[in-house]
Structure formats: C-alpha cells, structure tokens
C-alpha cells in the first residue's frame, strides 16, 4: 500500500498586535463536503486564534459548528471590524 502525504495550507495569516487571524478564501462553498475541505486546514491549527473563511456571496456573517467565522468578501473589505465579530 502506497503512503500518500497530503499537505494542507492556509491562504493568509495576518497579525495585528497580539491578535492573529488565519484566513481561507473561497469563491463559493456549494456543499457540506466543500465546507469541510475549506475548514480542514484551519481546524488542524492547534491554537486559539480566529479562523476565518471569506467567500463571495454571504448575506450575513456566521460561525460554523467548529467555530470558524464565515464572512462575505464585501463585509470583509468594507467593515474594518468584521474579523472581530
């Protein structure tokens, strides 16, 4: 049996003072499988800093069951406090 190693990555890591944000960007997340895929690398980070997924069309920000904040790109760009909600 062949051993396959899959490397996971996070799109952006942002630091602001003592805060850190891990950000995954996705055009759309049309299924629960795609949401799991987008969250997977974020959830493997073992610290308490905020994990965020930014998508094109999100009418209002919300948190997944795993505690990941989901934001729309317009809210992210236009609301300077959007990541701290």
Image (cartoon, rainbow, N blue to C red):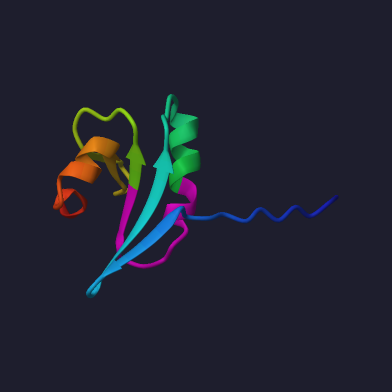
Residue at horizontal 29 percent and vertical 38 percent from the top: 73
Q: Nearer the viewer, residue 2 or 71?
A: 71
Residue at horizontal 14 percent and vertical 52 percent from the top: 81
Q: Is residue 50 above or below residue 34?
A: below
Q: Is residue 50 above or below residue 40?
A: below
42 magenta-colored: yes
> Residue 2: x, y in percent?
84, 51
Q: Is residue 66 left or right of residue 79?
A: right
> Residue 78: x, y in percent?
17, 43
Q: Is residue 66 above or below residue 34?
A: below
Residue at horizontal 48 percent and vertical 48 percent from the top: 40
Q: Is residue 75 left or right of residue 10?
A: left
Q: Residue furthest right?
A: 1
Q: Nearer the viewer, residue 59 or 6?
A: 59
How many marks are shown on the rendered structure? Answer: 0
Q: Is residue 42 left or right of residue 79?
A: right
> Residue 70: x, y in percent?
29, 41
Residue at horizontal 32 percent and vertical 49 percent from the top: 52
Q: Is residue 64 left or right of residue 8?
A: left
> Residue 11: x, y in percent?
46, 53
Q: Residue furthest top?
A: 30
Q: Residue furthest bottom?
A: 18
**Which residues are the magenta region?**
40-52
Q: Nearer the viewer, residue 83 or 33?
A: 83
84 magenta-colored: no
């Amino acid at each position: 049996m062949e051993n396959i190693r899959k490397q996971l990555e996070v799109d952006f890591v942002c630091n602001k003072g003592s805060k850190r944000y891990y950000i995954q960007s996705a055009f759309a997340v049309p299924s629960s499988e795609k949401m799991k895929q987008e969250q997977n690398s974020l959830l493997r980070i073992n610290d308490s800093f905020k994990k965020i997924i930014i998508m094109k069309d999100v009418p209002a920000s919300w948190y997944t069951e795993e505690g990941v904040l989901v934001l729309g790109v317009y809210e992210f760009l236009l609301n300077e406090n959007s990541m701290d909600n």
